[in-house]
Structures are given as C-alpha cells and as structure tokens.
Amino acid sequence: MDERPEMELVSIPATPRASTPEILTPSGQRSPRPPSNPKSTAWTPTSLISPRFLSPIGTPMKRVLINMKGYLEEVGHLTKLNPQDAWLPITESRNGNAHYAAFHNLNAGVGFQALVLPVAFAFLGWSWGIICLTIAYFWQLYTLWILVKLHEAVPGRRYNRYVELAQAAFGERLGVWLALFPTVYLSAGTATALILIGGETMKLFFQIVCGPLCSSNPLSTVEWYLVFTSLCIVLSQLPNLNSIAGLSLIGAITAITYSTMVWVLSVSQPRPPPISYEPLRSPSYSASVFSVLNALGIIAFAFRGHNLAMEIQATMPSTFKHPAHVPMWRGAKVAYFFIAMCVFPIAIGGFWAYGNLMPPGGILSALYRFHNHDIPRGLLATTFLLVVFNCLSSFQIYSMPVFDSFEAGYTSRTNRPCSIWVRSGFRVFYGFVSFFIGVALPFLSSLAGLLGGLTLPVTFAYPCFMWVLIKKPQRFSFNWYLNWTLGVLGIAFSLAFSVGGVWSMVNNGLKLKFFKPA
C-alpha cells in the first residue's frame, strides 16, 4: 500500500496592508503614482491578485482569482489608468460632478461667438437664418450625446481627451492627423479672439466710465490687449481643470447676464430709420455665395466646446455602478438649455433691432454705435464689464487642453511632473504667443467664419464617424445611415465654410491692412 506524502501547510507571511503610493503633485494634491524606485511597479486595484502574490496558493485557487481579475477588468469594474494622468492638469483631479459639468459646458458653449450671430442673419435673412440656427443646435446636441457615451465605450478604458478617442476610432496616426490640428487650432484661435474681444471691450469700458476726463493720454488698443493678456496669465496659474470650476461658474453667470442685457437693450430702443431685413446683396453671384458660406460658418462657430467634452468628463470619478456619463449628460443638458436661451434671442432680437445695418463686430458693436447716447452710461459700462469677465473665464477653459499638451510632452520626456515654475513658464509663453497672434491678425467676424469652417468636423462630423467605427451599429440600419449622412455632410460643409471664411477674410480683413499700433 503506497504511502501518500503528507501535505505541508504553507504559511503565508503577514504582509503590511497595501496602500497606494502617493506623491505631491504641482497643485498640492496627492495622486497615486509609481514609487520612486524605477524597478518597482505601480500599485493598481488588482495588484494583490498578481501571479507573484498568488505563488504560494494552489493552482486551482490561482486560476480562479486570475480569471476573476480579468473578468472584473473586462466588464469595467476596474478601469486601467495611465499613471501619467495624475501629473496632467486635465486628469490630475477627478472629483468633478454634474454641477461642474454644467459650469464648464456653459462657459465653453456661450460667449463672444454668440454676439456675431446677427451678422450671419444679415446675409441669410429671417427664414434661412432661423432654420440653419435650429438645425445646427440640435445637430451639435446629438453629437455631444455621442461624445458623452463614447467616453467609456470600451470596458476598462477611459478616453480622457478628444484626440485619444479619435485615435481609438481612426487609428493611432490617422486619429492624430484628423483631430489634433482642429482641436489645437480651435483652442488657440479662440484664445486669440478672446484677447481681441476682451482688450477692445476693456477699452470701451474705460472710455465710458472715465469719459472726457481721461481722453488726454489714453492707452492704445495694443496696450489694452496686453493688459487683458496679463490678467489671463495670472488666472491661468490655477493648476487643473477642476480648480477653475469657480471661474467657469463666473463665466456662465456673466455670459447669461450680458447676453440677456444686450438683446433686451437692443430691442427696447428705437430701431434705426433706414433698417431693412432683406439679405445683404453682393456685387456678384460668387461673392453672394461666399458671403452665405461665411455666414453659415459663423453659425457653426457659435456652437463650439465639443473639443472639451471628453476633458470635462475626464474630471469625474467613474465606477461600474456610477459611470461618469450620467452626471456629465445631466450637466450638459442644463448647460445647453441655457445656451439656447442665449443664442436664439441674441440672433433673432439682434437682427430685429438692427436688420442688415448690423456691423461686422456683432450686436455689441451695434449697441454701442446706435445707442451710445440713449442708454445710461452705468448700464452700458456694466454690460461691457460682464463681457470682460466672461472672456477672462473662457480663456482659461479653452487654454487648458493646450496646457495639458505642453505638460504631457514634458512629463513623457522627463518622467516626472512639472514643477510650479515649469508649469507657470508654459502658461506665460502660451499667453504671450496668443497676444502676438492677436496683434498681427486683428480680424473678428471673418476669423469667426474661418474658425467655424476649419473646426466644424470636431463638432458635427467626427463624432458621427466615431460612433459608427467604435459602436459598430448594424449595417444599413437607421442609426448607420443617420451617422454616415451627418458625418459626410459635416465634412462637406467644413470645406465649403472654410472657403467662405478665407474669401471673407481676404475681401474684408485685408482691407483693414495689418493692425498698426496706435
């Protein structure tokens, strides 16, 4: 009778309780990071279910636990995080909520671009203006819903940036080529336009408040640009996207307030005598076509902010039971309700008040030109001051993806977080580069049309293609046809609007010549 060997009881030594290694990030927050020893590995929620830890346990038990680990990661209980994200300003803090999402979306979605909507109506007229504005609103609302749903389309993976989602849909190289340029161009172009609007509005505010007493030696326009840029640089020292939630709240409140004040003041005043609501006519047919395309580009640019949707959602915690898309969509619905309450009255009320007499600068310029002496100075100065506050707040949220790109390049090369001085240096550099671009290209309505054409795929086309490529709906179904049709139309409109924007800039912007500092 064979004797069976006795089973030895393997005693597992007591190990200290596992804890997440932490370091102090540049913003002073503690984030999980790998230990300083390069040989050691980063701690993850499943580190305790690793083969090394399970080596003393019998093979069946090991297989069960390893299979359970794979299953949990597959269904999304445990999201694999990129350790570098804890160093970057967009993903450094993940304590966002629906309120933050509403603040950020409203701050990014409404602003100076709404003020030039009546300029588009002057070329389109009543019917086509309202129809195009309504279609654009619901189209971009649908694509925003797509982006919110695609943030965690793959179990266990979060696409924290628009470019990352584009890479997942179109491939690593093609995604970068398609998404990187329009998103960076949208952020940088918007920052430049904000400097132009903010500096000029500060100059008008100073003239209204000070009056003839300060007309002896006033600041030039370029000097006001510099003052506004300096204020933007000071506010840009806030470390991450969640830290500017207060600024986004201020930007949202000021945007709603001055949008309402501008159209109410315009409608309440007598209309200029030679007003007409007939679309502006151009000397030639081709000029009329390009003017209409530029007007449609202005409407497209009015609905910006989709390049920030993934970044805003990345600031929220996400679990299997409480995914991030729920509070994000709740906040986005509230934000876009208020956006509709701003853009539609401005476009309709502004065109009703001024018709085709609307100057290229938009409804704010028309209000100052036609009713400068009819409206109390205090009320007019308050309106301009609210515009300045909104521009300062919008500059921060639109610049955050650029700051994130700068710091991502630095951390990937050095494998350490940016120090406070490096982070500040990046933001000072970006602010003054935007200032110099604004001085060299002081165009407003023409720039809005061109920006709308070049960045239109980010809002109207790419999300539809991403849905088809990632979600893979049934071929020839309604969903499949809808997204392919909207995506192709978005690309076609982008090309047409870009041509119209370039034509408008050449025929209108270059007539101003390059800006000569006064």
Image: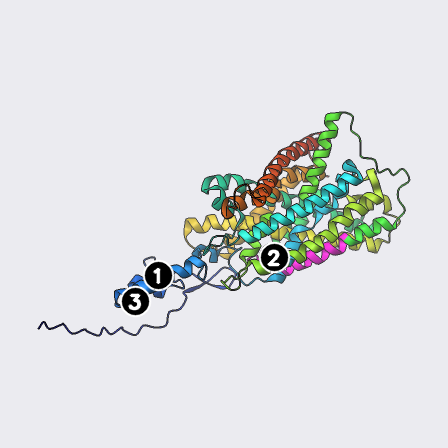
Query: Mark number for residue 329?
Result: 2
Disc 3 on helix, strand or loop? Answer: helix
Asked whether the viewer can see residue 80, the reply is: no
Q: Residue sitting at 68 percent across and 40 percent down?
A: 448
- Coloring applied to the structure: rainbow
Q: Residue sitting at 41 percent across and 66 percent down?
A: 20
Separation of marks 2 and 3 at Cα, in angstroms: 42 Å
Q: Residues within 10 Å of mark 3 (few under 14, many from 20)?
A: few
* Sooner in the amino-acid sequence: mark 3 or mark 1: 3
In this view, the residue in front, 307 or 344, is 344
**In the image, is 147 to the left or to the right of 340?**
left
**Which residue is disc 3 drawn over?**
61
Q: Nearer the viewer, mark 2 or mark 3?
A: 3
Q: Determine if the magenta segment contains residue 251.
A: yes
Q: Which residues are magenta?
A: 235-259
Q: Are marks 3 and 1 in contact (CB under 8 Å)?
A: no
Disc 2 on helix, strand or loop? Answer: helix
